[in-house]
Amino acid sequence: MNKKQKKTPGIPTFERPVDRIFYEMDQKFATGNKIAYAVFIALAFFGVMGLIWMIPFPKLGFLVRMNMDTFLNWGSFYIAIIIYLYLRLAPTLSYAMLFTIGVMSFCIVQLEYVERDGGPAVWLVCTVLTLVGIIGAVFQAKKEPTEIPPAAIWRLLTIGPIWLWSKIFNVLKIKY
């Protein structure tokens, strides 16, 4: 603990920033149904990833010639940024998120096939899922006994996926 850090009574000190973040999230979202949070966070994360995935990417000549233009999209950059940020917080949890993102990517590609075969547009499905996820997470947070500020809900939606993985890791007694 350096001179700038003051020990607050009743609040533990933490070795890593991720431990402090998860502790704060545990305090704010302590009484809520973790399964409901998991469902809503997953829906919101999947929806946002799908929406970013569907933004048209410019056709680059060298990628088209190498037949790699279908693998590079804005979702790829989003995934890289998210994994990098999660990797900086908790490497082991970022690997779990990479697995989760892989499954979600597969599902987005399946939605593209459904759209191609006459089904609903992927952007429409992802918009609905995003809205359901965000609205559900907000309503779930409103059930908490203390007032949850909007910044905490934003943190829940951004850091929430690895926070939920940390709960699974804790149950399985895996260090992260």
Image (cartoon, rainbow, N blue to C red):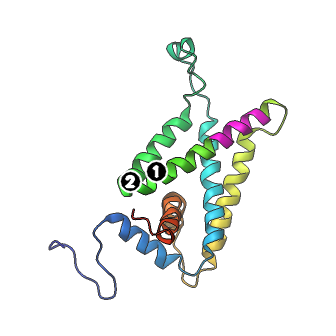
Q: Residues within 10 Å of mark 2 (few under 14, many from 20)?
A: some
The reply to whether the magenta stretch includes residue 97 is no
Pointers 1 and 2 in contact (C-beta within 8 Å) = yes
Q: Does 174 sit above or below residue 99?
A: below
The image position of residue 159, as x and y in percent, is: 48, 60
Label for residue 105? none
Relative horizontal placement of residue 144, taking residue 26 as reference (left or right): right
Relative horizontal placement of residue 93, taking residue 2 as reference (left or right): right
Label for residue 91? 2
Residue lying at the far left of the rendered structure: 3
The image position of residue 29, as x and y in percent, is: 53, 76
The image position of residue 109, as x and y in percent, is: 68, 36
Quarter of the image for residue 21 reads: bottom left
Q: At x 65% / y 49%, what residue is drawn?
A: 47
Residue bearing mark 1: 95
Quadrant the C terminus occupies:
bottom left
The image position of residue 27, as x and y in percent, is: 47, 79
Q: Is residue 144 visible?
A: yes
Q: Residues within 10 Å of mark 1 (few under 14, many from 20)?
A: some
Quadrant the N terminus occupies:
bottom left
